[in-house]
Structure formats: C-alpha cells, structure tokens
Image: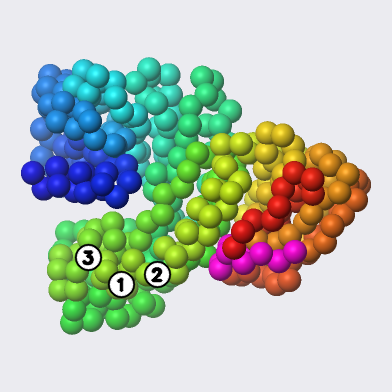
Amino acid sequence: EHVDFIVNKANELGLYMGLLPTWGDKVYSAHPAAGPIVFNTKNAEIFSAYLGRRYKNNQLVWILGGDRNIDNHEVLDIWRAMAKGLRKGDDNNHLITFHPRGESMSSFWLHNEDWLDLNMYQSGHARHFNAVYKYAETDYLKSPAKPVIDGEPAYEDIPVKFWDYCDFKTPLRVPKEVLNDNGSIKNLSYFKDGFFTDYDVRIHAYWNLLSGACGYTYGNNAVWQMYKYGGPISIPCITDWREALDRPGAQQILHIRKLLEQRPLQTYFPDQSIIFGMNENGDNHIRAAHNEANTSIIIYLSKGQPVKVVMKKIKGEKINAYWYNPRDGKIIFINEFTNGGIQTFTPETAGMNNDWLLMLEDKNVFSPIKE
C-alpha cells in the first residue's frame, strides 16, 4: 500500500517511476549481500505477473537486475521469467530495462532479448573523469538499435571508491571517530580519494548525453538511501537527504534540462569528427554532437580547453557561436562567423571546475538558447 501511494503520487506530479520488482540480492549472484535468495523461474513469473497487473495503468519503467550481474544460466532464466510475468501482467504496457553492477552493461548479456526495451549501464563510483562515453558509444552502435542510459553514474557527495573505506559488516561502516554525533561525516579526510561533486555530475552528464545516451541519472549519496541524521547508514553521508535536495549538482541538472528542452536530445547524433586534431581520453576529453539537419553543433569542454572545430560540419553561410555555462545556465554570445575552414574557440575560463558548452548554429535557423 505504501508503494501504491508513492507510485500514484509520482504520477500525479507528472513523473514516471523506475520500479524494481526485486532488489538483486533476492536472486543468486556472485555478490550476495543481505539476501535471502527467494526467486526461481516459477515464482519469479508468478510474482512479477501480480506486480504487472497491480501497476498496469501507472506511469513507470520496470527495472530488473537490482545492481547485480548475471552470473550463470539459471540466473538468466530467472530474469527472463520475471520479464515474462511483467509482460503477461501489464499487457506489454511498460518498458523494461536491467540495472547491472558497477562498470557493467546490460547489453553484455541481454541486448538480443526481445523483452529488453532499453539498455542500461552503471559507470559507477570508482574515479573522477570516468570514461562514460565508452559505454554509450558501445551500445549506441549495436544492432538492433536500442536506447541506452547510464543508470548509476557517480553520485554527488558519495566517497570515491567508498568500498575501500567502509566495513559493511558494521552499522557505522567506518570508525566512530570519523562521524559526528548525528552520524554524518566529520572527518572528510578519512576518505583519501575524496568525494564526487557537482563538477563530476556535469562531466558525466554531458559526456553521456553527447555520446548517444538517451538520458542521464542524477544521484546524491544521502538521497538514494534516504539518510536521516541519527538513522541507519548504508554509506556515510555529508548531509541528510533533505539538505541534499539543494546541493549544487541537483540545481545544475536544471540547466541540462533547459538546454535539452530547447535543443531536443533525440535530434542530435554523436560526431567526434567535428573536432580537429587529437582528442585524448581522460580529463581533457572533448565530446561533440550535431543535430539531424546539420544546423546545430554542441561541444562539451570539461576543463575549458581550447577546441579546433571543422566548421563545414554545419550548414549555413553565417554561424552564430556562443558559450553555455553549465554551472549557472548563462549564455555568452561570442560572435557571428562566416562558415568555413578550421576555427579555434577558447572559453573565458579554463582548468578544473571550469567546464563549458560551445554552441555553433546556423544563424538563419536558430535563435540563442533562452536563459
């Protein structure tokens, strides 16, 4: 009944729920966690058919997997049975995807399953400047074509490689002196690899979106576990979940939405040939995409680095160029250019935490993004 309330309330607000029939520890895996294992091919289909009927008319996407990989053929058959039950119960009324473990992709096992409507990968929480674009590129080129999304990129405020510093057999996860009396993190330096910030959120979002992903998942360490001060701890937090709703990364997601509503993502295609010269992996990696009509180009510069652009990749005699600041959503008009040749664009600021989007557009087709 509580789940019913949450799903219905989300739908009232115009949201679609991502609903898991089960967390992955209720099916066998090489990473068993709390358990117990309860599902087999028979009861998985019965249970998921019941869920399908119960939520048939709700707005949702079914997510199988539950942060687990498929470790043998029996497990694969259980997930197939669960998908079959969902299809039977909701009359094929909802999309189905699969949430794998960190640095894994659903397409590795399931791309050709007819019940898998869209692929999901988890780029995970192991490093800054994670090459999420490699996951997106890989699935974007698969046949048959299916949408793909990064279902769990690095969450804002979560410690980098948190598993190296947490003892999951203890309630506090870390030594008591690391935490405040309310259970939040007091000694940030205990996590020697640091924390993911709004900067990481922006980098992984734009790298994903300009590489063929159909969307992006924003997460915050306190929100995903609904951490309350003094409450149980899954992974130690900097704030409680209510304060986390106003963290910088959560606010900057709004700027991504604003951009993609005015320049619809589904009309853009990844195209690294827009960038002239070497484009290294790592923190200086550049991503580029053009729209279907070849009248608009978007280029993301993770450190405000100069970029050389092959101008004839875009149509139009006169091109408007401007910067879009992903930190605050502000627009800076650069100039009007005669289209042709190789042109170099250099943002106003550079270095860590100084990322920029370069927008190049046919003057006769587009007006600038509205702030």
Q: Height in image: 150 above or below 226?
A: above
Between 253 and 204, the one nearer to me in the picture: 253
Within 10 Å of disc 1 (Cα), the crowding (few <14, some 14-19, many 20+) is few
Q: Which amino acid type is shown beneath numbered disc 1? A: Glu
The magenta segment is 325-333
What kind of element bears circle 2?
loop
User: Along the polypeptide, which appears first: circle 3 or circle 2?
Assistant: 3
Badge 2 local density, few (<14 within 10 Å), some, or many (20+)? some
Mark 3 nearby-residue class (10 Å; few <14, some 14–19, many ≥20): many
Label number found at residue 247: 2
The residue that label 3 is drawn on is 227
Instruction: Report helix, strand or loop for mark 1.
Output: helix
Q: Which residue is mark 1?
A: 243
Q: Callout 2, which amino acid?
A: Arg
Q: Is residue 334 visible?
A: yes
Where residue 100 sits, quadrant-wise, is top left
Left or right side of 367 for 309: right
Q: Quadrant of residue 87?
A: top left
The image position of residue 284, as x and y in percent, is 67, 58
Name the front one of labels 3 and 2: 2
* Residue occupying image coordinates x 23% and y 81%: 180
- Number of labels in the image equals 3
Magenta stretch holds residue 327? yes
The secondary structure that most of the magenta stretch takes on is: loop
- Establish if 133 lies above or below 256: above
Q: Amino acid at mark 3?
A: Tyr
Q: Residue at x 32, y 46 (%)?
A: 15
**Disc ID at residue 341:** none
